[in-house]
Amino acid sequence: MNATTTTPALGFGIIGVGMIADYHAQAIAAATGARLVGIATRSAENARVFAAKHGVPFATTSVAELVARPDIAVVCITTPSGAHLEPALAAVRAGKHLVVEKPIEITTERADELLRAADAAGVKISPIFQARFGEGARALKAAIEAGRFGRIVLASAYVKWHRSREYYTGWKGTLALDGGGAAMNQGIHGIDLLQWFAGMPDEVYARKTRRVYDHIEAEDTLSATLHYPNGALGSIEATTAAWPGWSRRIEICGEHGSACLKDDHLDEWKFREAQPHDDAIRAAGPDPAMASGAGAPNAISYQGHLRQIQDLVDSLRDNRPVAIDGHEARKAVALIRALYASAACGAPVKL
Ligand SMILES: NC(=O)c1ccc[n+]([C@@H]2O[C@H](COP(=O)([O-])OP(=O)(O)OC[C@H]3O[C@@H](n4cnc5c(N)ncnc54)[C@H](O)[C@@H]3O)[C@@H](O)[C@H]2O)c1
């Protein structure tokens, strides 16, 4: 008798099939132990085209119909950022685990409503922050946890990207559905990495402006100084108005070492106390899974999403926590909301 049993692939659904849903479909197809069973989106024509492209057996315009399916265990929420909560609640109340695109929601209040519902239903949330799965990001996090920097002096994130004028049509740059601009939509990847590495600041002082894209409601540019509870200082700069768009940089500078993560490549990596693997880290090229979205949103690779979706599938199989949970993803939203509050009142804001 064959003692090995094969676990059936976990059924996935996707709600909202626009630009990023394509990456989710590719990642689910490439993940081990996952299969895409159904999608729901507002337009029947979009649903049909997407289902045909990805070979999805079930397509509907009804969120309720999708989440009622017993063969779906995980639902990816890829609707506009300020429209994550309602379909996410429907999925959670139907007992589905979630993958939710960044930001988890556009306010801490809406994020909290989802977190409470997921906790009550006993389901997992894997909020997308694919940049945390890069080799460079992981090496930097490990060095911080090992105390290699000593006391951190400055911890900063710079996300100077470019989005075209045409990008800002529809919901992008609106306060109701994007929740903000260069910080909430694009800068958030760097802001999440920064708080993962250095922890949450306890005070921020920000300014924001519409320097070029004066037709949008939100900011195209934001700059802030940060103070951390341990006394370290730092900066955040985010824009979508700078052509051609540079690599994202996260700089961690400490009394015993300094590093710069340029996209996912450790461009600077120097410590007083060298370790044998330092040369390999310096020599490593950029992680191909972490292609940059500096110049255009669709320049990224689905490989980052694949790593995160694989983590969720494995965590469900092994009954262990996901690498990033909903409470963790809320931190970037809280930090960006504090930046906006500071910019609005023209004074430092405590977190
Ligand atoms: N992780 C990343 O690198 C990354 C990159 C781009 C976008 N995103 C995030 O993905 C999300 C979607 O962005 P996008 O660029 O794909 O947007 P998009 O406008 O291309 O797609 C959104 C889709 O959702 C549909 N939709 C809207 N409301 C709906 C609802 N209530 N129910 C069902 N469908 C609905 C729309 O019709 C559209 O097809 C956003 O939260 C964004 O921040 C993440």
Image (cartoon, grey):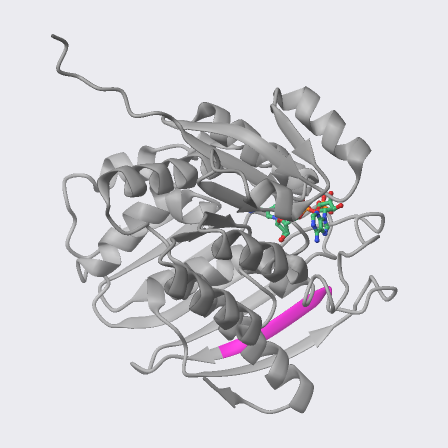
Q: Is residue 199 left or right of residue 211?
A: left
Residue 256: quarter of image: bottom left
| Chief secondary structure of the magenta portion | strand
In terms of depth relative to the viewer, which is nearer, 287 or 40? Answer: 40
Q: Which residue is drawn at 46% across and 32% down?
A: 11
Rendered position, 199 above or below 351: above
Q: Residue at x 57, y 63 (%)?
A: 105
Residue 319: quarter of image: top left
Q: Where is residue 177 in the image (x, y as percent from the top left)?
A: 72, 62
Rendered position, 242 above or below 105: above
Q: What stretch is highlighted in magenta?
A: 220-225
Q: Where is residue 323 in the image (x, y as percent from the top left)?
A: 32, 50
In the current view of this chain or complex, which residue is farthest to the right? 215
Q: Which residue is drawn at 50% across and 74% down?
A: 334
In terms of depth relative to the viewer, which is nearer, 47 or 2? Answer: 2
Q: Residue at x 49, y 24 (%)?
A: 29
